[in-house]
Amino acid sequence: MFDDLRDLYQEVIFDHNRNPRNFRIIDDADRKVEGFNPLCGDRLTLYLKLDGDVITDASFQGSGCAISTASVSLMTEIIKGKSEQEAEALFKQFHEMTTGKDEHFNLEAIGKLAVLAGVREYPARVKCATLAWHTLDAALKNQQQAISTE
Amino acid sequence: MTLFDVEKIRQDFPILKEKIRGKDLVYLDNAATCQKPQVVIDSIVHVYSHDYANVHRGVHTLSVRSTDKFEAARTKVKEFINAASDKEIIFVKGATEAVNLVAQTYGKANIKAGDEIVITAMEHHSNIVPWQMLCEQTGAVLRVAPINQLGELIFAEFEQLLNDKTKLVSVVHMSNALGTINPVKTIIQAAHEKNIPVLLDGAQAIPHITVDVQALNCDFYVFSGHKLYGPTGTGVLYGKQALLDAMPPYQGGGDMIRKVTFTETEYNTLPYKFEAGTPNIADVIGLGTAIDYINAIGMPAIAAYEAELLEYATAKARAIKGLRIIGEAEDKGAILSFVLDKIHPHDIGTMLDSLGIAIRAGHHCAMPVMDFYQVPATARASFALYNTHQEIDVLMNGIESLIEVFG
């Protein structure tokens, strides 16, 4: 019945929505930033644990739609073990994938995150996917204030 | 028309023939804005093609023709809400502007530090923020009458808020987020007993309920044209003439003056005192046509049909496991707000859109209502005179299927 939506709602997204990874609080987090999408009411808190410039642990709490939940869940998995620079590079690539004009974007380079490429066809939902990454960007820049997609 | 012929009505709305993602459009976002019948679209084209010039200005033929049609639309509005005079009908760009107008003119002239303004917990942002701004400017205090879990105003608590300091009551006639129809007549009586004027926000009520401002005895009534099958950028402020006469003007400019020198200006009479600048001529004429269209079908017939649709939709929604209706007031208009277990409203909205179904997902410009029910957002199906029982079936089948997909 929802054949048209297979690109947007891939099974991986349903899976992460049902069972979000790293859905917990890091009590001694080095970074803690809130992200908010006032348009949808998506709300998350991102926690990072750092060792030098390496992200040793990442987790989140909050509530949102399947796209935003899957996006933040996938992100916390992928950035673990990455350096801050590597994470920033992923943010730029993710941003390019979801909002960029390049139709030949190299999906392989972005690995698992490619499951979220479908949002580019749904402008109303792009912010759901990018909220997690904007929050990460703020956390890496050590901004304390909550970030908003609007 | 004695029988309500929905298939015939649907023929009047060209957009209903649109295909959305290859499917028949099922338009259930009428509380956000209604679609337009061909006669309204034609009337705007006709004005610009045959009658258009500026109003209240020239002696030339087109200006006279435009003015006549523009003022005829005012009379249609006056009759539609049964105002006492054309002078009580002020054209603005929408209900929001009308509330702001009252806040910044009546409010500034009559509401002082320590005074109180009473609203309800189910207001749209447009009936919250203008008052908060006025309170900031004057030092007045905004008081909020609570609602119960069904989404009904707790009248006893509302009544207790009314006191010597209360200078205005501003309440929604029908809630856009919940569908609740407020007991406005009783509210007005209670406020008037204490000599408190009442503004009714009729943005949502106007296409669903017969409004008689004299029978209600409200002091102000505001609504938008685009929710009444009319063009965007049209709205109406009704005010009792004595109140409007005593109010300072809203904006300064052309049309709202009688005489201008560099030392003083004499303001025009009602309603022009509040209509500075060239008004939205063609769209206001289109609003007049929308009112003709509704009158030809008959408001009681529309209300009865929509009540039937709501009852049908509510019964079907209640049968869906995991669906919770938000807003179950006893007196309710054709709005069905709901949430699903573990499925965010925005996912519901996207999934239904892929089936051609347009609903609203979000906070409906009523964030305090979302906070009250402790939900980030709701999905909302809202019905109009052109919706059908079959469309409700399509909606409910869609909801059942997406629950299955989400698992």
Image (tube, coloured by chain):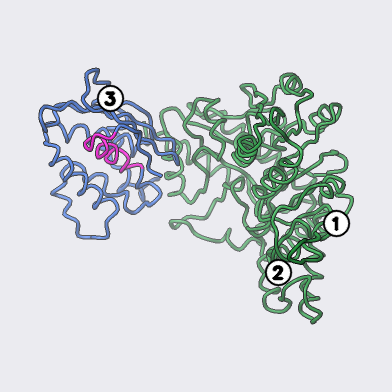
Chain colours: A blue, B green
Q: Is residue A74 visible?
A: no
Which span of residues is magenta-colored?
A: A128-143
- Return the residue at label 2: B43
- Return the residue at label 3: A23
Quadrant housing residue A62: top left
What amino acid does circle 1 point to?
Asp
Residue A129 drawn in magenta: yes
Residue B325 picture location, percent across and down: 56, 29
Residue B257 picture location, percent across and down: 78, 63
Residue B406 picture location, percent across and down: 37, 34
Are the two marked residues, 2 and 1, in contact with CB atoms closer than 8 angstroms? no
- Return the residue at label 1: B86
Name the subunit of mark 1.
B
Nearer to me, B173 or B339: B173
Residue B273 drawn in magenta: no
- Badge count: 3
Query: Label 1: how many residues lie within 10 Å, few (<14), some (14-19) or many (20+)?
Result: many
Secondary element at image label 3: loop
Q: Is residue B279 above or below residue B97?
A: below
Viewed as shown, does residue B375 lie left or right of B143?
left
Residue at the image position 69 percent from the left and 52 percent from the top: B228
Nearer to me, A20 or B57: B57
Are the two marked residues, 1 and 3, in contact with CB atoms closer than 8 angstroms? no
What amino acid does circle 3 point to?
Phe
Quarter of the image with the C terminus of chain B in it = top left
Viewed as shown, does residue A121 lie left or right of B169?
left
Query: Label 2: how many residues lie within 10 Å, few (<14), some (14-19) or many (20+)?
Result: some
Mark 1 or mark 3: which is in front? Answer: 1
Residue A1 circle label:
none
Secondary element at image label 2: helix
Nearer to me, A120 or B4: A120
